[in-house]
Image (tube, helix red, strand yellow):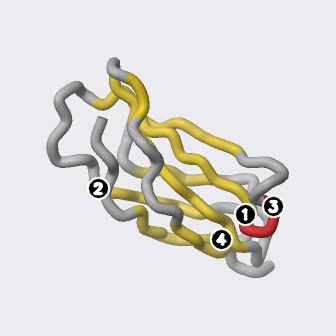
Amino acid sequence: PSLVGAVKKDWASPNSIALSWQQPEETTLPIIDYEVKYYEKEQEQLSYSSTRTRAPSVIVSGLKPATWYVFSVRTRTAGGYSSYSPKYEYQTTGD
């Protein structure tokens, strides 16, 4: 499966970050959905969360204010998962 394009932050609030990305241009199999993996930058070894979306965008909520998060995205097709995109770091806003 193909990698997604650059993951960009559309907006941020104290508890949410909205992300979007370019769909892969050439896919041999249709994309079923995207998996967005994210974690607090300081907590990489401790835990991470993930969410799925069918659209090439997502709003990740339940985040902490004024905190840096690391995001990466991969596609899922009938053939399996792609590799994760490069990591992108974005910060929620303060209170």
Q: Which of the marked residues, 3 or 1, is nearer the chain's N terminus?
A: 1
Indicate which disc residue 43 carries: 3
Q: Which of the marked residues, 2 or 3, is nearer the chain's N terminus?
A: 2
Which residue in the rendered view is the most extreme toward the bottom? 94
Q: Nearer the viewer, mark 2 or mark 3?
A: 3
Q: Secondary structure at mark 1?
A: loop
Q: Nearer the viewer, mark 3 or mark 1?
A: 3
The reply to whether the C-beta atoms of the residues labelled 1 and 4 are less than 8 Å apart is yes
Q: Which of the marked residues, 3 or 4, is nearer the chain's N terminus?
A: 4
Q: Which of the marked residues, 1 or 2, is nearer the chain's N terminus?
A: 1
Q: Measured along the vertical axis of the image, is residue 62 above or below residue 15?
A: above
Please state which amino acid type lies under the numbered disc 1: Asn
Compute the Cα span from label 1 to label 4. Answer: 5 Å
Q: Residues within 10 Å of mark 4 (few under 14, many from 20)?
A: some
Give the labeled residue for mark 4: 13
Q: Secondary structure at mark 4?
A: loop
At which x and y percent is residue 14? 72, 71
| Residue 93 occupies quadrant | bottom right
Give the labeled residue for mark 1: 15
Compute the Cα span from label 2 to label 3. Answer: 28 Å
Residue beneath the point at 81% across and 61% down: 43
The reply to whether the C-beta atoms of the residues labelled 3 and 1 are less than 8 Å apart is no
